[in-house]
Image: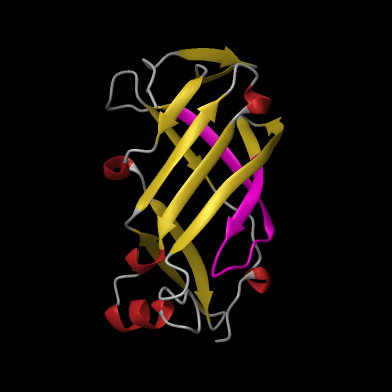
Amino acid sequence: MTTPQLSTRDYEGVTIPGAGTFSLDPAHTTVGFVTRHLMVSKVRGSFQQVTGTIVVGDDPYTSSVEATIGTASISTGQADRDNHLRGADFLNVETYPELTFKSTRVVGFKDGEFTLVGDLTVAGVTPRSSWPSSSRASPRARGARRSSASPRRPRSTARTTA
C-alpha cells in the first residue's frame, strides 16, 4: 500500500483530505473510551495497540475505515481493573485478542462531520454502530490532519456479564 502525498480539498465549506489510502500511524493514534462505573463515576481508558486504514474516496460518501485493536493493550491507569477487563467477564483477551471496526457506509454530513456506519466487533459480538467523525488541520504539523470518531453504541449491546 502506498501513502499518497497529503492533499486537501473543500467540501461544503470544510477542508477534508484529498482522495487516497492512509495507514493509521500508531505513534499518533489514540483509541480511547469513557464508560460509567456503577452509574456513578466515569472511567476513562485507552487501547495502546491499533492498526488500520482509511480510504478517502473522490466522493466522500464512498470512503471507508478499517481498524484492528489489540484487546490486551487496554489501559485505564488501574492495573487490577485492567486485568479484570481483560478477563472472561469483559474482553476475554485469550479468546478474542482483537477488536475490529469495519465501516459499511458513510451517511450524512452535518456541522462539518460525516457519520460512519459500521460493524464494531467486541468479544465476538458485532452490533451495527454509527460514528460521527471529523477531520481538521493539525495546528502543529504542516499539512497533517487530525481526525476523530466517536461511536454511538449503548452498553446494553456489549457482551459483559459484570
Picture residue at 35% right of the left edge, 76% below the top: 82
Residue 142: x, y in percent? 29, 19
Q: Against 93, is 107 above or below?
A: above
The residue closer to the viewer here, 12 or 29, is: 29
In the orientation shown, which residue stands out farthest toward the right? 108
Would residue 125 be counted in the magenta stretch? yes
Picture residue at 39% right of the left edge, 65% below the top: 45
Left or right relative to 120: residue 2: left
**Quadrant including the N terminus:** top left
Left or right relative to 79: residue 119: right
Residue 4: x, y in percent? 39, 17
The residue closer to the viewer here, 11 or 139, is: 11
Picture residue at 42% right of the left edge, 82% below the top: 87
**Quadrant including the C terminus:** bottom right
Left or right relative to 52: residue 58: right
Residue 24 in which image quadrant: top left
Picture residue at 32% right of the left edge, 38% below the top: 25
In the orientation shown, which residue stands out farthest toward the bottom? 162
- Prevailing SS of the magenta stretch: strand
The residue closer to the viewer here, 140 or 122, is: 122
Q: Against 97, is 20 above or below?
A: above
Left or right relative to 142: residue 95: right
Residue 99: x, y in percent? 49, 60
Residue 27: x, y in percent? 26, 43
Would residue 156 be counted in the magenta stretch? no
Magenta residues span 116-136
Colouring style:
secondary structure
Number of numbered discs on residues: 0
